[in-house]
Amino acid sequence: MTSSRFPSMTEEDYRASLRLIRTPRIGAVTYNRLITRYSSPQEALKAVPLLAKRGGGQAPKIASEKTVNEEIEQVKTLGARYIFRHTPYYPPLLDQLDNAPPVLLVKGNPRLLQKPAIAMVGARNASAAACRFAHDLGQELANKGYPVISGLARGIDTAAHQGAGIEKTIAVIAGGLDSFYPPENKELQQAISEKGLVVSEMPPKTEPKARHFPARNRIIAGIALGVLVVEASPKSGSLITAKLATEIGREVMAIPGFPMDARSQGCNQLIREGATLIQNSDQIIEAVSVMAALFEEPTEKSPLEPRFSGLENGQIGYRSSPAIAEVKAKDREIIQSLIGSAPVGVNELIRQSGLENAIIQTILLEMELAGRLESHAGGRVSLLF
């Protein structure tokens, strides 16, 4: 399940990619649409104003070269590096997602991203018994060759990281690599960044906000073969991660708990809905065996140093530019009339409009850049105004 190979890009292309990524309204899906459509990131940058105008709004303010240069220097200072999508060291399973982050910022050992890994998440206010169980499971999985991924939160996340050991754990955080949340895990995060791996999609100096955590959770689920929930209340962030894992075809597993404990209700609910009941590490490995059989560690060798900086990253590439669909004014009117405040999927737009997918994708891209669309799970969209 390795990534496809694409033509090499210049340093100017790297910087143009970062300018696109750091531009408002250009999220992962929009970025990937732009890169798929245009022959290079520089061409995509030039196209943004015209596309937004056609979409019926003003173009977003494109991130400046100065902003990107400052970020690159900050990344170098941190002793971190960029890993762009479609490069050998980008996580192979994450690379398959439509909303995969265009670039990851990492500090530590990026080779961990090429190992079949298990995500473990759970309650921040977890019981002592659950924390001990998560710790032991993490240790057993790491000893059997499966790095453990979690979000460095209090409770289960912390126990899982500590159990796996700092050399065999991946911490995905919601803020920049220089942010420490929760504060009491600062030493743990620093230790993981030296011998394990800390991952973020946010630039340095970004403090974690509530809206960043669901995006962080999709990365946790996307990297892993499967997601294990150890303890969780019915409306916890852990269940959001489990839901995301289900949507992208990952194995969802849960530890059963006492029905009267609110911290077990989320796990028991998951099991009722079809999650695999787990009692030990062997059952985890068995549960992810189908996905593991599809996982291929990249065999291509690229010169890598223990620490990485800036944009020195081997190869990054882009898909060949497809034929650009010719969109008529009438086509835009039809699609815009079909999109309302309720989320609708692309397949439904195709069915009701009778238009080709390429035409619809072009119109959606224009509307996104114009700030008129809101994206939802499952590739659905709704109108903002």
Image (cartoon, helix red, strand yellow):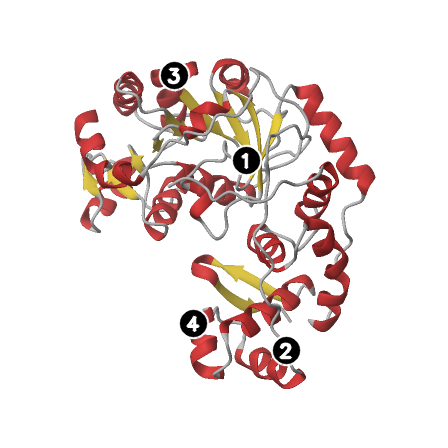
Residue shown at the point (61%, 37%) measured from the top left: 202
Q: Which residue is mark 1?
A: 174
State the CA–CA distance, disc 2 to disc 3. 54 Å
Q: Is residue 243 visible?
A: yes
| CB atoms of marks 2 and 3 within 8 Å | no
- Contact? badges 4 and 2 (CB < 8 Å): no
Quadrant of the snapshot with the N terminus? top left
Q: CA distance from mark 1 to mark 4?
A: 32 Å
Label 4, label 3: how far apart the Cα atoms are = 44 Å
Quarter-wise, where is residue 204 in the image? Answer: top right
Q: Which mark is residue 162?
A: 3
* Quadrant in the rendering for residue 154: top left
Image point (70%, 39%), residue name: 10
User: In the displayed structure, would residue 381 be above or below residue 119?
Assistant: below
Query: Residue tagged by mark 2?
Result: 327
Mark 4–mark 2 Cα distance, whole angstroms, equals 18 Å
Answer yes or no: do the residues labelled 4 and 3 have beta carbons within 8 Å? no
Counting residues from the start of the chain, the first of labels 1 and 2 encountered is: 1
The three-letter code of the residue at mark 1 reads Ala
Residue 158: percent from left, percent from top = 41, 22
Give whichever of 185, 309 is nearer the camera: 309
Q: Which residue is mark 4?
A: 347
User: Is tag 4's residue or tag 2's residue first in the polypeptide sequence?
Assistant: 2
Q: Nearer the viewer, mark 4 or mark 3?
A: 4
Q: Between residues 52 and 38, which one lies in front from this camera angle?
A: 38
Dot 4 surroundings within 10 Å: few (below 14), some, or many (20 or more)? few
Residue 150 appears at what percent x and percent y? 41, 30
* Residue 152 visible to an observer of this rendering: no
Residues under numbered marks 1 and 4 in contact, where contact means CB atoms less than 8 Å apart: no
Q: Secondary structure at mark 4?
A: helix
Instruction: Report the side of 138 relative to 7 (left or right).
Output: left
Q: Residue flagged by tag 2: what amino acid is it? A: Val
